[in-house]
Amino acid sequence: MSDKRRNWITKFQDAARGFGVACRQGKSFVVHFLFAAAVLICAAFFKVTQTEWCLLVLCIAGVLTAETINSSLESLAKSVTSEHDENVGHALDMAAGAVLIISIGSAAVGMVIFVPYLLKLLNGTAL
């Protein structure tokens, strides 16, 4: 179907369906969702600032976006060839590397935000 005939509702439905497929087919999504839930629970427990909430939500969105792109490339690669192709392998490795980069960066942001709260909790000072 031509993009000119697709309305915004259809585009959003397609995007939601695509994210659903990525969640169902991407084994790594379970891990990402568990970490995201843990981060959100900790943020609520520690009553982080509005800015910290924004940073955490952006990190979660970044990781899930990278994982969705990685999963879409894996799906595309499977449809292109079932044979080993070095270029396809490199592309898949780079996409996985992108997930690793954003995950490490997000973990660093989480540490910067949560370590001071944890130290206050361990020292018995008020949050």
Image (cartoon, rainbow, N blue to C red):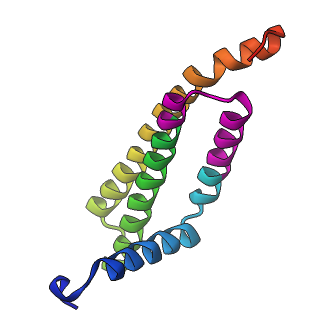
Q: Main secondary structure of the magenta part?
A: helix
Establish if 73 lies above or below 117: below
- Measured as percent of width and height from the top left, residue 81 is found at 33, 77
Q: Is residue 51 left or right of residue 2?
A: right
Q: Which residues are magenta?
A: 34-55
- Measured as percent of width and height from the top left, residue 120 is found at 74, 12
Q: Nearer the viewer, residue 104 or 36?
A: 36
Name which quarter of the figure residue 86 lies in. bottom left
Residue that appears at 67% across and 29% down: 47
In the image, residue 53 lies in the stretch drawn in magenta: yes
Q: Is residue 3 left or right of residue 34?
A: left
Establish if 75 lies above or below 38: below
In the image, residue 86 lies in the stretch drawn in magenta: no
Residue that appears at 38% across and 79% down: 14
Name which quarter of the figure residue 123 lies in. top right
Establish if 15 lies above or below 122: below
Farthest-out residue, right: 124
Farthest-out residue, bottom: 1
- Measured as percent of width and height from the top left, residue 122 is found at 81, 13
Quadrant location, the N terminus: bottom left
Q: Nearer the viewer, residue 82 or 22?
A: 22
Q: Nearer the viewer, residue 95 or 40?
A: 40
Quadrant location, the C terminus: top right
